[in-house]
Image (spheres, rainbow, N blue to C red):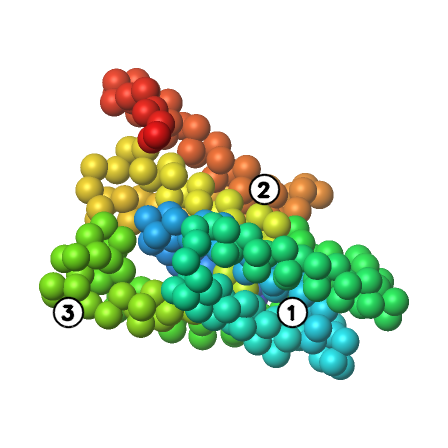
Amino acid sequence: MEGVYELFCSLAHRGLLPEAFEHAFMVRALLAGLIVSPLLGGMGTMIVARRLAFFTQTIGHASLTGVALGLLLGEPLNQAYAGLYGFSILVAVLILYLRNRVPTVSDTVIGVVLAQVLGLGIIMLVLVTQRFDVHQVEAMLFGSLLTLSETDLLVVSVIGVFAMLIIGFVFNTFMLTCFSQTLADVRGARPIFVEYLFVLTATLVIVASLKLIGALLVLALIVVPAAAAGNVARSLRGYFWLSVLIAVLSTQVGLMIAAVTSIPAGAAIVLGASAIFYVTWFAKLLRGSVAPVQRKS
């Protein structure tokens, strides 16, 4: 990594990049953003289509509980990977199991699990603050450029490669299942297997992005780019790639803002994505394609 740091530092000295890139933490944040943001943008289209947005928020809160659990079990402060990933995956499996077994609305099931996770998380955080300064764990809430280590970047890279392979494998089948369960059955798709595979992959990506975006804001970077792309996209392919582009653009702009101000990285990224959403919404208005919303009875 030293060679990469030196390259960015030299480009910053020459005025080809902002001065913030003289710092190694900014380079790590840029690289992590380039890996995570297209994944979140692409997965956002699938999550919105499957109505799993509430699920991502639950995983974000579960990650905080997982970090606290890992710290209580003796993991290092900035490397509580077993607790973080282990507990988040456990919660994701529990949600999917209940969704497929309990005869109730999906959001209700997720809400029940979210309530349990929040209750347990509050207890865990209280116990953690008796041993650690609360400011040492707040980066997980809002995102922090300073806490992103080289180990975190390596983890993000490995998960990123794995996630890209899975998305390429399940995208068509997953979207077909979302729009027509009957047609998916006729074509021999295995919707439950595909859903488990996708959701577990999405969980890994969400958790990997938390130090950059924050647990409270990761939902926005999944939903907002997809919503913005939906305003102007004319095809499913365009919808997917436009969501990826918006996520990447808003992440890089947000990182630049966070580097030169005291604004948390996650907040800057989400505000950038929200601004793009309103631009696309106004573009849709000007195109005259907005119809009054009809509520289903």
- Mark nearest the camera among 1 and 2 is 1
User: In the image, residue 227 lies at what x, y percent?
Assistant: 38, 39
- Mark nearest the camera among 2 and 3 is 3
Say which quadrant the N terminus sits in: bottom right
Q: Nearer the viewer, residue 177 or 204?
A: 177
Q: Is residue 271 above or below residue 165?
A: above
* Residue occupying the point 44% across, 41% down: 224
* Residue occupying the point 28% across, 21% down: 291
**Residue 210: in sight, yes or no?**
no
Question: Which residue lies most toward the front here?
Answer: 103
**Residue 295: in sight, yes or no?**
yes
Say which quadrant the C terminus sits in: top left
**Residue linked to disc 2:** 268
Question: Which residue lies most toward the left here?
Answer: 186
Answer whether labels 1 and 2 touch (C-beta < 8 Å): no
**Residue linked to disc 1:** 66
Mark 3: few, some, or many residues within 10 Å (few <14, many ≥20)?
Answer: few
**Residue linked to disc 3:** 188
Q: Nearer the viewer, residue 275 or 230?
A: 230
Secondary element at image label 3: loop
User: What amino acid type should be assigned to the residue bearing mark 3?
Assistant: Gly
* Residue occupying the point 70% across, 64% down: 120
- Mark nearest the camera among 1 and 3 is 3
